[in-house]
Amino acid sequence: MADVARFPGIAEQIRLVAALRWRLLRNSLRRKNNLLDLIGLICAGFFGALFVLGVSFGFYYGASRFTSTARAGWIALLFWGIFLFWQLSPIFLAGFGAGFEFRNLLRFPLSLRAFYLIGLAYGLADFAAIASVCWLAAMTLGVAATTPKVLPAMLVIVALFVLMNVTLERLVSSWLERLLARRRTRELFFALFVLSMVSLQFIAPAVDRYGNAARPWLFLLLPYLSPLPASLAGRAVSAAIGGNLGGVLAGAAGLTFYMFLFSGLLWRRFAAQVRGEELSETPAPVQAIARRKSIEQTEQPEMFRILSPQVAAVLRKEFRYLARNAFAFLMLLVPPLLVLVFTWQFPGRNTAAPDQGISPAFFFPGMMAYLILFLMAPSYNCFAYEGRGIQSYYMAPVRFRAVFLGKNLMLIAVLALEIALCVLVLVFRVGLPSAPIFVSTLAAIVFAVTGQLSIANWSSLSFPRKLEFGQMRGQRQSGMAVLTAFGVQIVLGSITALILFTGRWTGNPWFPAEAFAGLAAAALGGYFASLDALSQLAEKKKETLIEALCR
Amino acid sequence: MPDIAISTDKLTRRFGSLIAVDEIDLQVAAGQFFGFLGPNGAGKSTTIKMLTGLLAPTSGRTELLGLDFASHPVEVKRQIGVVPEGMGLLERLTGTEYLHFVGRMYGLDRATTRQRSEELLDFMQLADRPKTLISDYSHGMQKKLALAAAVIHGPRVLFLDEPFEGVDALAAGALKALLGRMTGRGVTIFLTSHVLEIVERLCSHVAIIHKGRLVAQGSLEELRAGIAGEEGSKTTLEQIFLSIVGQSGAERPQLEELSWLM
């Protein structure tokens, strides 16, 4: 009979989990070429600490100021700030985690109680939780410095607020984990998340335009926030400052109610996980479908007859990958949305103040440059989503020029569509510039795109980094690929500026168009000339590429 | 002397100071079902990667079907099929789409690609999941698809790295029969597997690699003949393998050390 080891206590298990997270982080830095990551991490840690410290002073000052100027009711605003940061920032910061799934602990013999407590401790180890606790401590000091007698009540309220927040954060994370277990949901969620972030850009123009009209409606909504935890905490502290014990008890009771409510729900979630909740998305066997029908469904019309079979195969595969990457697909909406946002900042041709509008002569080329900057970025790591499939290219009897041609054609098709959409938005909102500027811009686009493609292809081979569809955690481009893209865009931007300046200086409005057309032709020649060299480089770099993408 | 399908000359691969494959000289005749064996970390997958162009050798050369790989990579790849270690599938395609992609990459016309894809998917029992992405396939289904992709262009040499791992018994039986028929038609199959019974049943010739060096090569009969004594002819491949790779007393795990488990 095998020996059975002494079962560790909960404190010991929490310590083990903390040590595990630290080891995971440390080991992730042991990989080759991760020096930049380490430097980035140290910088992030330093600036994170500065941020927490700086904001702590803000909370200290705010709390003491509200207390000393008899505006204790405003303390609720501080609680709201902390509440929103604590609940929302873990979603924003998910990409910088050490890549540890809390559920993995379930393989060990943990009781539900131990799993629950470790879960809470795990939640308290997040950056958002640590920062929030620091800010709450600063608030407590700020209030106590002005009104020392409030300290005991403040400590109780803050403790309840911390427990409620950590429970809610774990509950939300746990539900998100269940929701995001399915690939399609995960991708859609991620894409909607990014789109909502982009949509935040609309807030400023919307406030400018509709702010005054919306204000009464907002004030009508405020009372509905009062039963929520942050308002309850603020009111309880305010009551303590005013010596109203009943108010303190009511606030504390409300927070306790929320804490127990969230604890109960979290307990149910964790219980489901401990029981072995199935999150797998491997489909159950389905009934056989008539084969003929299935093949017909996948038939595609022959759209790429003029291309070689290999280039056409890569191009078709790229289109399929785009259509199945809900994130990338929805991201195609971002450029026209951004153009709309920017045009909203300035009066367009349909507003009553056309004199204050920016000139299309500047706006059109500027907007196109911005779009190129945005849309070309993924091409600097164009194998990111291939995963193990990269081996298919190396096993097949093709040179990499066919692979690059297929991928680049796909990018150009997307770029053409996006630019056409954006031009339509611009025509509607701002209007088109003069013919020389319009033609110059189009020629500059051809130059900038083809000029970048060769270098982007080189960067894709030299600095590959695997990315997963629709995942936020650990999704970072290679630092060198980002630097390369940045450098190339600065160089191209400088050349463009020089040509535009020369055109203006010589007084010849068609000079930039002619110059960009010449450069575009040269860039196109350079692009085709580079393909063979890139094919050879792909052979030399195959180990790096396969290792990076098959990891 | 039969035609040589695979031939290596002092094929070597170093990773820093580690010599993963050390000057191996392989000779595989055309039409042979060839088993390539070795303990974990011996250099099997590294060798297959070098033979199929997925990894460049540090030194030495490889010839496939009489063509030097380094100077004729495209011509060689056109005639070989590979199921690599990680299968190398494009997981965001469906099985049908992937086979169409591979067929076209090997230069097959659309009609042939379509017909062969249908037949292969039927044979591999994958035709009932037309809309399922490869990423949602089980491991065994992915393996079957990788096998289908490796043969869609009718290769003359087939490299299989653990081809039956995760494949159900029914499909494995059909696959073994298919592979047997392929060798009958002159196709050379180079197979690695840790399941020695499979290798013994399928392969006519075997090579064993240990710590990067080729320690044995020949037909099963020749290897059996190398075992001393009258029992040599009855020796199983497992016994041959153990006698050649031969863990000495010092290397062999001592069960006594795990007394707490027993």
Image (cartoon, coloured by chain):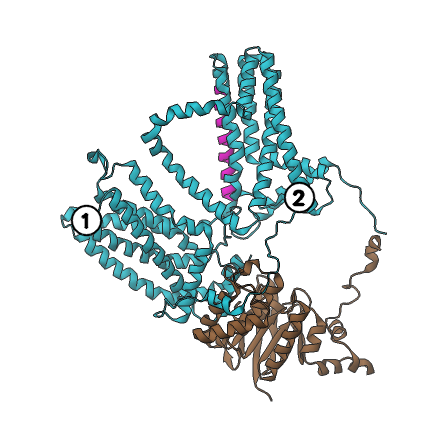
Chain colours: A cyan, B brown
Which chain is disc 2 placed on?
A: A
The residue that appears at 45% across and 44% down in the rendered structure is A192
The image shows residue A143, relative to residue A348, as above or below, that is above
The dot on residue A502 is 1
Tell me which amino acid carries mark 1.
Thr
SS for callout 2? helix
Q: Nearer the viewer, residue B18 or A81?
A: A81
Gap in angstroms between the C-alphas marked 1 and 2: 67 Å
Residue A485 at least partly seen: yes
Q: B126 or A39: nearer the eye? A: B126
State the residue lying farthest toward the right: A1
Picture quarter with the C terminus of chain A: bottom right
Question: Range of the magenta residues?
Answer: A38-62
Tell whether B20 sits left or right of A6: left
Above or below residue A115? Residue B89 is: below
Image quadrant in which you'd find residue A150: top right
Q: Is residue A116 above or below residue B178?
A: above
First-in-chain label (1 vs 2)? 2
Please name the predominant secondary structure of the magenta segment in the image. Answer: helix
Q: Is residue A134 above or below residue B228?
A: above
- Of A166 and A431, nearer the camera is A431
Residue under numbered circle 2 = A273
Q: Is residue B39 left or right of residue A466?
A: right
Q: Residues within 10 Å of mark 1 (few under 14, many from 20)?
A: some
